[in-house]
Image: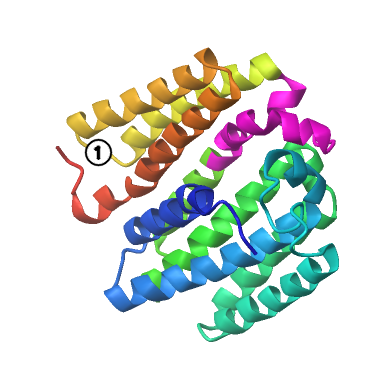
């Protein structure tokens, strides 16, 4: 099934890759490719599930997708969803019980989000997003790294990443307010239009300062990262059309990608300037 590939890559694929390479750390090129395949397969599973459950919303926001355009039926989408689940579980099992458990957790989170109504309220959505991101990041880190488990720095990075996602994930909802409202979803920007933008601004500023300190990056890197965080927050708060919200989200994805690379400094001192 088709999806907006650019959205997938900027919101999950590249940030998770950056995180795994920094937190793992990256063991070899072959481990990197293995991790890419694992991420891509699980993205496909999540995408098929999401699209099968959101035909009405997609008809308004993404009419080119297979279901709203009539190229795939809902029953066909659900059959494909279960095939992707089986494929992901079998592939993960080849890496051992730990990766299999992560894969099963990612599917459970996706199922709760799409089939049990968690997507309909911003609190449930945020918790599912934490589960999804942390599952992606922990699985990719274990596969791309030396495969000896997660050390203290990796666990610390996962904890901070989960908290960061929980407090900033509403960034992806500002541009989709119209479609979310049409489908009956209650996102943070719909529930509290002004407060959600204030919270996003504060969260981006806070995390930019806190992560710079937590990972002890150098003064120049710190200045650039903090400046980008506050600029992103201001962009979300000040410019409020659908088009500018999409642009704000693109800037946010760049900031998030950089945030995910910061643990690299603990490993190598690469960001000490």
Residue at image coords 54%, 60%: 136
Q: Is residue 34 above or below residue 106?
A: below
Relative to residue 236, is residue 20 drawn left or right?
left
Magenta region, main secondary structure: helix
Q: Secondary structure at mark 1?
A: loop
Residue 87 placement (x, y as % from top left): 63, 80
Q: Is residue 218 magenta?
A: no
Residue 272 placement (x, y as % from top left): 17, 41
Relative to residue 45, is residue 8 drawn left or right?
left
Q: What is the count of numbered marks?
A: 1
Magenta highlight range: 165-192
Mark 1 neighbour class, 10 Å CA radius: few under 14, some 14 to 19, many 20 or more: many
Residue at image coords 48%, 44%: 160
Colour treatment of the image: rainbow
Residue 124 placement (x, y as % from top left): 76, 43
Image quadrant containing the N terminus: bottom right
Q: Is residue 232 above or below residue 89?
A: above
Residue 105 placement (x, y as % from top left): 67, 66
Report which quarter residue 205 is drawn in. Answer: top left
| Residue position for label 1 | 217
Relative to residue 148, is residue 44 drawn left or right?
right
Residue 159 visible in image = no
Relative to residue 95, is residue 53 drawn left or right?
right
Q: Nearer the viewer, residue 158 or 7?
A: 7
Q: Nearer the viewer, residue 217 or 29?
A: 29
Residue 75 visible in image = yes
């Amino acid at each position: 099934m088709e999806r907006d590939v650019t959205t997938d890559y900027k919101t999950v694929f590249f940030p998770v890759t950056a995180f795994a390479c920094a937190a793992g750390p990256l063991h070899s090129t072959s481990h990197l490719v293995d991790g890419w395949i694992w991420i891509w397969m699980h993205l496909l599973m999540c995408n098929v599930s999401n699209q099968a459950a959101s035909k009405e919303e997609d008809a308004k926001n993404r009419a080119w997708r297979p279901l709203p355009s009539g190229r795939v039926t809902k029953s066909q989408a659900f059959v494909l969803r279960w095939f992707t689940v089986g494929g992901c579980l079998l592939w993960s099992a080849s890496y051992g019980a730990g990766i299999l458990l992560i894969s099963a957790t990612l599917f459970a989170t996706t199922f709760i989000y799409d089939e049990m109504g968690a997507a309909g309220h911003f609190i449930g959505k945020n918790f599912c997003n934490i589960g999804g991101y942390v599952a992606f990041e922990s699985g990719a880190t274990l596969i791309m790294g030396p495969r000896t488990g997660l050390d203290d720095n990796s666990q610390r990075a996962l904890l901070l990443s989960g908290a960061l996602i929980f407090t900033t994930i509403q960034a992806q909802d500002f541009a989709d307010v119209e479609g979310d409202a049409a489908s009956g979803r209650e996102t943070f920007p719909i529930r509290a239009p002004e407060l959600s933008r204030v919270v996003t601004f504060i969260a981006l500023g806070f995390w930019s300062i806190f992560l710079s300190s937590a990972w002890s990056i150098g003064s120049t890197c710190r200045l650039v990262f903090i400046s980008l965080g506050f600029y992103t927050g201001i962009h979300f708060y000040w410019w409020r059309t659908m088009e500018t919200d999409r642009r704000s989200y693109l800037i946010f994805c760049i900031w998030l990608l950089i945030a995910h690379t910061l643990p690299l400094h603990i490993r190598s001192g690469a960001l000490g300037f």
